[in-house]
Structure formats: C-alpha cells, structure tokens
Image (cartoon, rainbow, N blue to C red):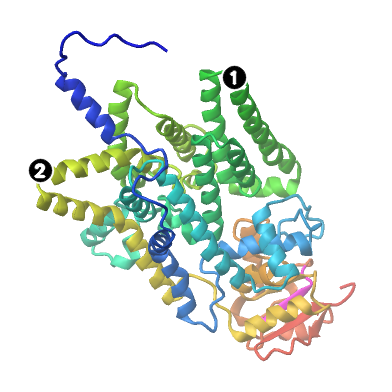
Amino acid sequence: MSVSEPPTKPVTPDPTLSALAERNRDESPADGVSDDGKFNAPKVVLLIVIALAPFWAIPVAHLTSNPDTATGFFQYELPYYVANGRAAFERGNGVFYPNPYDPSAEAPSIYVHWLPWSFGLLTAKIGFDPGDVILTFTFFASIVFAWATWQLVALRSNSDRQQNLSFLLAMWGGGVLCTAGTIAAMANSQTWLASVLQFDPGQGMWFLNWGRNSLFSTEAIYHALVAWCWVSEIRRHRRAANISLLLLATTHPWSGIELLLTINFWRAIEFLRSRDAVNRNQLSISIATLVAFLGYYKIWLPGFPSHSELQNVWELNWSLSWTSAALAYLPVAIPCGVLLRRKLATGSLDRTEQFLLAALVVATGLAFHDRLIPPVQPLHFTRGYVWMPLFLLSLPVVFGWYRAWTQSSRMTAAMVCAFAGCLFLSDNIVFSIVHSQRQVSKADGFHLMTDERALLQTLHNSPDTTGRIVLTESETLNYLLPTYTNVRPWLGHHFNTPSFPVRKATWDGCFENNRVHADRIPQDVDVVIVRRSRNASSLTQDSAWVPLDLQNGVWTGWSRASGK
C-alpha cells in the first residue's frame, strides 16, 4: 500500500470536482444496510399491508359481489393452474401431468412445474376447495412478494425514510397510461370506466409495472424469486441466487427464460472481467441450468405432436405498441437516462447499477423481440421486468431532484411532487378501481350457483363419469371441469384445448336453438350434461344414450351406452 506525501502548501478545492463529488454522493446507492436504526418489524408489516391494499381490493370485491356464488377465481387464467396440478394426480404419474384440456386418454404426461403441482396436491389429494387454495396463496404470496420488493429497493436507498418511500413507489408506481386513457375518453366522448385502460394491454392484466404482480399468486411467487435472485446476485450470495434461479426455471417458462438469460448475461460479463474460479463456476451453473431448460422446452416437449400443436397456437403476436411502451416507461426512463448519462460520463456505475442495466437490456430485448424475429407472445416478457430496473436506476436522480426543489421553494416542491405523484400512482389506483368495479358487476371472475357446485361434485364422485370425456352446454362449466373434477373436458381453455375453434363451432351446433342435437355430438364424448329446461328429446329417443341420475334439480345428464 502506498502512502502519498503530505502537501507542502494548502490546496485550493476545484469547484467542478466538488460539485461532481456532491452529485455522486447524492446518487450513490445504499449497501442494503439502513442507517436510521434497527429493523422495525411492525412498521414494515404496516407498509406491506398499505402497499398491497389496492391489489387486495380486487379479490375482496369478487368475494363481496356475491359471497354465496364467488369461487375465488377472479380472473380467467387462475383455474388453469389448479387444473394442471390436479392432472398430475388424476391423469399423470403424481409428478408429470398431461394437458388437462386434452380429452384424449393418450395425452402424454410430459409437463412438470412445482407450483401448479402444489395446487394439485392441496385440491386433488388433500381435498381443499380450488378457489380457496388460490385465494390463500394470493394472500400469502403477495406478502412474500412485497417483502422481496422491500429487500430489493434497499439496494437503492440511503435511509429508512428513503426505503419506505421507494418501496411504496415500487409497489404503486406505474406510468401515465390511465392519464392518456382519460384524455382519450374525454376527447372521444367515451365512457370512462370502459376506456380508461385502453392503452394498458389486456385492460392492464399484462402488468407492465411491478407492484401489480401481487394480484396473482403465481406472478407474485415468480417475481419474489426474481427479486431474491437479483438481490442475491448483486450481494454475491451465490447459493441463494442459484436456488432462486432453479426454482423459477422449474415452474414457469416465460419468467424462467428471462431470468436465466439475465443471470447468464451478467455472469458472462463478470467472468470476462475476472476470469477466476468463482466466476467460472457460477457461469457454468447458470449455463447448465439454461441448457437443461432449453432441452426440456425446445427439444423434448416439441417431440410430442400434441405439444407441437399447442406451441403453434401459443406463437401469438401479443406485442407491446410503442405508444403503450412510451406511456408505461417514460416516467421512469427519463430519470434513469439522466443517471446513466451522468454515471457513464464519469465511468462510475457501481455493481448494483451494472446489474440492473444488464437486466434492463435483457428484458427490453425480450419484450420487443417481435421487431426483429417472429413473435412469441412478447407481452409475457414485460410483467414489470422492464419497468423495475428503470425505476431502481432512476431513484437517486428522483431524490436528487426532490432535494433541489425543496432547497429552492418548499411550496413549489410540494406542488410539483403532489402533481407528479398523482400521475405516477394513477395507473395502479385506476386499475384497482376499474377491476374492483368489474368484480362487483360480475363482468370478470367465476361464480357458481349451488346446483352447479353440486353438479361438479357429482361428476367428480360418480363412477359413471369419473375419468370420462364430458361435454356440457355451459362454456364456463366446460372450462372449470378439470379444476374441480376428475373428468376430461371435451372443450375447455381457449388456448390449451386442441383445435379449440373447431371444437367451439361443433359445441355451438350441439346446443343450437335451445335443443340438444344428438346427431352432432362428437363420437369421443362419453357424457353430455344439459339443463333440464333445454329440449333434450333427441337424447331420450336415441338408444345410444342412457340417462344419468345426477340428483340435481337444474341439470340432467346422459352417458353414452357401451359400444355405441
């Protein structure tokens, strides 16, 4: 270690260097250790509850809309995850499962994901209600996700107060999508509720910002694993990072490949900078995980024709428009750009910033890959993965701006911050209002009447129906069959049912004009379920069909006679 000679005369400080040092101090990220005292658990718990309240409002609205009929499935995709898990136990080998919406008895058991498997264990084996499982997981998974987010923002916070505010902004913050939607609605004389989310893809259900992912138990768990992996990788907690990486890679293809590419990209950079054994081993682990992942999804699964058919359906151009991208990301991209310009000019990007920049590059490339190559659902790669690195990188600049404003005029600062804060938080506040209203009005979510629940229970328990192919006149019941029962639906999920458009047209013909047309029922259907109010004379007059005793005042059924 060298020791410099003391100066022989006083040194006059360079004002330019002093200003640069002050700016770097203001923009320096924290090391994750708070300087305002000990960890305050009650305060953090309260902050987590406050942060999650807008998102919890939506399932609560679903339950209160009609407590007697609400299933707990407040969005279309949620029953699908339980159906996958049940299939592992009811149609698979206890670990691997077939596509639950493929009615064929020959459907191969080739899928394995531990999170749906957990849902299946709790419903098919232990007997919990499927909707109750989803709601319970949603509650606890959202808390875990919020806690992981709390740890993530600590990397960019210099004090407890700054971490508290950063956490709430991370959970509630978004863009100006709803502001633009409101302006467009006013300009075009549109109804506000129906049009305010017009620029937010899928009525906001693609979750372009981070905190919204707490709404689904699945996304909350995926994003908690991503946050823990990011934090662990930045802090060089290598074992924790690898465990998080493996857990995500083995339960979700979209988030899995995104995190795998991010970690491999980052570790490759690390290895090129320092070719030591530790970096080489870490890169080898992540590459091996990526190779196994690609081998499963790109080599093994496509070897099965049933999966290849679905793969062709899944290659959809669900893309993010430049307009929506600008409205979603510019509020965080602008201060992020300011920070990067300043830091890159001085070569002072620290480890956290370098990692976040790598994550941003990967997420942006995946979210907009349709601009370069054939699209494979680009929106699946948004989910807050573009927004969060931008947000975290921007924090020092935002807090620096705030300090500058308060030093000039507290009144001006208060007005500017109030206005900017309302804009920044508007996306998720409006999202919560709109989707809570949709739950109250039952525009979204699944509700089951008492007779429908009784029907599902009978189908699950009756030896005349268990394991057989069932077709009902209700599209909702068709979809929910593998979620609640051990039967095979002839028609189900829009994107996972083989040849869905053809089957849907056939289904329409079977129940046309309030009649059951026995001659149109597909030959592979074993059981037909219809309301007693529907004209089913063609079934009663056809010897190929035998009536079932469902003991249900609303629904009746027929089973195909043996050999018919």
How many callouts does the rendering have? 2
* Direction from residue 121 to residue 31 in the image, left or right: left
> In the rendering, which numbered label is found on residue 408?
2
Task: Indicate the position of residue 196 as horizontal and vertical percent values.
Answer: 31, 61
Q: Residues within 10 Å of mark 2 (few under 14, many from 20)?
A: few
Task: Indicate the position of residue 486 as horizontal and vertical percent values.
Answer: 75, 70
Q: Nearer the viewer, residue 543 or 70?
A: 70
Residue 342 image-quadrant placement:
top left
Q: Nearer the viewer, residue 273 or 295?
A: 273
Say which residue appears at 53% left-offset and 78% top-offset: 70
Quadrant containing the C terminus in the rendered view: bottom right
Report the amino acid beneath label 2.
Answer: Ser
Say which residue appears at 30% left-offset and 21% top-offset: 346
Quadrant containing the N terminus in the rendered view: top left
Image vertical order of residue 479 relative to residue 558, above or below:
above
The stretch in magenta equals 525-530
In terms of secondary structure, where does tag 1 sit?
A: loop
Report the amino acid beneath label 1.
Answer: Asp
Judged by its main secondary structure, the magenta piece is: strand
In terms of secondary structure, where does tag 2 sit?
A: helix
Task: Indicate the position of residue 242 as horizontal and vertical percent values.
Answer: 61, 39
For disc 1, the marked residue is 276
Q: Residues within 10 Å of mark 1 (few under 14, many from 20)?
A: few
Task: Indicate the position of residue 173 as horizontal and vertical percent values.
Answer: 34, 53
| Residue 84 in view, yes or no | no
* Direction from residue 72 to residue 308 in the image, left or right: right
Image vertical order of residue 44 relative to residue 397, above or below:
below
Q: Nearer the viewer, residue 495 or 530?
A: 495
Q: CA distance from mark 1 to mark 2?
A: 50 Å
